[in-house]
């Protein structure tokens, strides 16, 4: 009625007033659109950041048995792809769906009583929409690339820590790993908010341009209205409702597909967050004695891996290791040597029997406190994508610089560190790709020295090294083993001969025990292994 009254010619001054009011309404709508899109999107970004932290914070604390059943790539997908889908729903899709359902319903009703005469004039809206899209769209595209890069960095960190989960847990660095990941996620969040702000301005400007163009169309069509060819109400109704209905249909079709993807994504993320670790501290954990001695006892231990319940890896395994003793463990592949290390670190619990450290059943103690008593040098050294100093400091994040340098010197790692481009601050690349096998091994030894734990678990990793590297690593190992209870999965005759006792395993059981000379004199499995592996005649 207002438009028709203004176009009737009875009071032409009202035309300017009506159009001014329409422009004011368009401006208010643009501001409201910006505010709605920005704040709803902010909530979506915040939710997805919290979900990612919750998923990773739980994953990094799950037991190794979980990773036997789940691929790391699938976990990374839940951290990134699935949470991104959730973000699209929480941040925009639900809001868009509600708005467009109402728009579609109302538009269809009112279009039923309008005319299509001025359809051609609606096309004048297109240039006014394309220009801001091209201008601000470039900025959005650039920022989106930055967001993906930051998200990829967070995913890479998660993938690295998950791939090295046993090393992370052995050095009780779960909290530190989660904090580093948290910082990566927050950087991605901050960049996402910058992108959202630009997109919000873009949406507001587009709305302003669309409605401004429609007002222009109405102004051009005023002559037809005055001449009686159509009323102003018919003109305005067609232009506005046709555009809104078309946009609503397109938006709802996209929202529907997003909702279908989001339902599965939410389920996958909740599944991870709700998973509980198989190995966790009891409600009232026993305290390991101080000062520590490093005494180890396996009491009638039987064990099968959860993924292989019918395969008994250890069978009634009983062993006592005294304080400061050096015990070499030998045996064929699959004898259960590595499983002894796994159980001692409480990555798994035995099916039968118990394991004691300093007289305390480790099943009744906090796993973190148990692992603080152990330093591990694996056969394949784990080097993180960080500097030399950060890799060594992993053994004790609170260590002083002097302690870090002393550990490197004790491991004979300082010999090559000083030759690196930036010394201790040299970035080593993913999995230590810039170092040789012997250099990576000495970094791992320095890390174990810095941890200064009373018990050393050593999967001797000199068998694949050249003679010079082997000699240097062996010297570093001898330094590391001083005054520590040491269990060595032996691959070299030199290590076996220096051990206080040699434990011979086969098929999950102890078949013999003694010194090198005693076992060679008795013949049997050890003598056969010595001839085959060590060239002993």
Image (tube, rainbow, N blue to C red):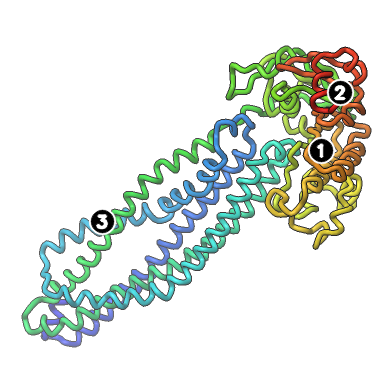
Q: Residue at x 85, y 35 (%)?
A: 453
Look at the numbered discs 1 and 2 and tell me whether their residues touch, using CB distance below 8 Å.
no
The residue identified by callout 2 is 295
Which residue is rendered at x = 31% and y = 77% of the image? 128
Q: Is residue 295 above or below residue 378?
A: above
Residue 1 appears in view: no
Task: Name which residue lies at 71% across and 40% down.
Answer: 168
In three-dimensional space, the C-alpha distance between marks 2 and 3, rounded to whole angstroms, equals 73 Å
**Vertical comparison of 397 with 32: above or below:** above
Task: Classify mark 1: helix, strand or loop.
Answer: loop
Helix, strand or loop for disc 2:
loop
x and y percentages locating residue 473 in the rendered image: 86, 42
Q: Quadrant of residue 68?
A: top right
**Which residue is the site of mark 1?**
462
Of tags 1 and 3, which is closer to the observer?
A: 1
Q: Quadrant of the C terminus?
A: top right
In the image: residue 201, left or right of residue 98 = right
Closer to the camera, 119 or 433? 433
Foreground tag (1 vs 2): 1
Marked residue nearer the N-terminal end (1 or 2)? 2
Among the two numbered marks 2 and 3 on one chain, the one whose residue lies closer to the N terminus: 3
- Picture residue at 38% right of the left edge, 68% below the top: 203
Look at mark 3 in the image and give the residue it sits on.
Answer: 102
Horizontal side of residue 268 vs 72, given as left or right: left
| Element at label 3 | helix
């Amino acid at each position: 009625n207002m438009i028709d009254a203004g176009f009737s010619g009875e009071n032409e001054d009202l035309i300017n007033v009506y159009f001014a009011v329409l422009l004011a309404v368009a401006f208010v709508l643009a501001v409201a659109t910006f505010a709605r899109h920005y704040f709803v999107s902010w909530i979506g970004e915040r939710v997805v950041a919290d979900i990612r932290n919750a998923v990773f914070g739980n994953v990094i604390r799950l037991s190794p048995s979980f990773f036997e059943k789940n691929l790391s790539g699938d976990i990374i997908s839940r951290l990134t792809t699935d949470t991104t889908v959730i973000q699209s729903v929480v941040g925009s899709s639900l809001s868009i769906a509600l708005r467009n359902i109402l728009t579609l319903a109302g538009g269809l009703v009112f279009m039923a009583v309008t005319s299509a005469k001025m359809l051609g004039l609606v096309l004048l809206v297109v240039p006014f929409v394309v220009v801001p899209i091209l201008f601000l769209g470039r900025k959005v595209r650039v920022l989106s690339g930055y967001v993906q890069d930051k998200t990829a960095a967070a995913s890479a960190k998660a993938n690295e820590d998950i791939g090295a989960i046993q090393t992370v847990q052995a050095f009780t660095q779960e909290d530190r790993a989660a904090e580093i990941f948290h910082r990566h996620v927050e950087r991605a969040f901050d960049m996402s908010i910058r992108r959202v702000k630009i997109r919000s301005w873009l949406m507001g400007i587009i709305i302003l341009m669309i409605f401004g163009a429609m007002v222009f169309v109405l102004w051009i069509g005023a002559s037809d209205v005055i001449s009686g060819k159509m009323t102003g109400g018919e003109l305005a109704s067609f232009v506005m409702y046709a555009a809104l209905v078309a946009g609503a249909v397109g938006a709802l079709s996209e929202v529907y597909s997003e909702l279908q993807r989001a339902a599965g994504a939410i389920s996958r993320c909740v599944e991870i967050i709700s998973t509980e670790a198989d190995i966790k501290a009891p409600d009232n954990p026993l305290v390991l004695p101080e000062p520590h001695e490093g005494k180890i006892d396996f009491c009638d231990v039987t064990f099968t891996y959860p993924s292989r319940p019918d395969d008994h890896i250890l069978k009634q395994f009983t062993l006592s290791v005294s304080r400061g003793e050096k015990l070499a463990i030998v045996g064929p592949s699959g004898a259960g040597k590595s499983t002894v290390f796994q159980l001692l670190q409480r990555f798994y619990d035995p099916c039968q029997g118990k394991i004691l450290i300093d007289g305390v059943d480790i099943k009744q103690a906090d796993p973190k406190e148990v692992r603080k008593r152990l330093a591990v040098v694996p056969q394949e050294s784990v080097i993180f994508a960080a500097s030399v100093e950060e890799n060594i400091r992993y053994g004790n994040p609170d260590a002083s610089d002097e302690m870090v340098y002393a550990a490197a010197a004790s491991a004979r790692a300082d010999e090559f560190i000083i030759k690196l481009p930036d010394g201790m601050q040299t970035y080593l690349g993913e999995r230590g790709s810039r170092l040789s096998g012997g250099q990576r091994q000495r970094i791992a030894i320095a890390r174990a020295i810095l941890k200064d734990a009373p018990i050393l678990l050593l999967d001797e990793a000199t068998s694949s090294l050249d003679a010079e590297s082997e000699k240097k690593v062996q010297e570093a190992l001898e330094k590391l083993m001083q005054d520590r209870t040491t269990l060595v999965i032996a691959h070299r005759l030199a290590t076996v001969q220096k051990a206080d006792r040699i434990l011979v395993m086969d098929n999950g059981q102890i078949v013999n025990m003694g010194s090198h000379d005693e076992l060679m004199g008795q013949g049997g499995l050890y003598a056969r292994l010595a001839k085959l592996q060590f060239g002993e005649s």
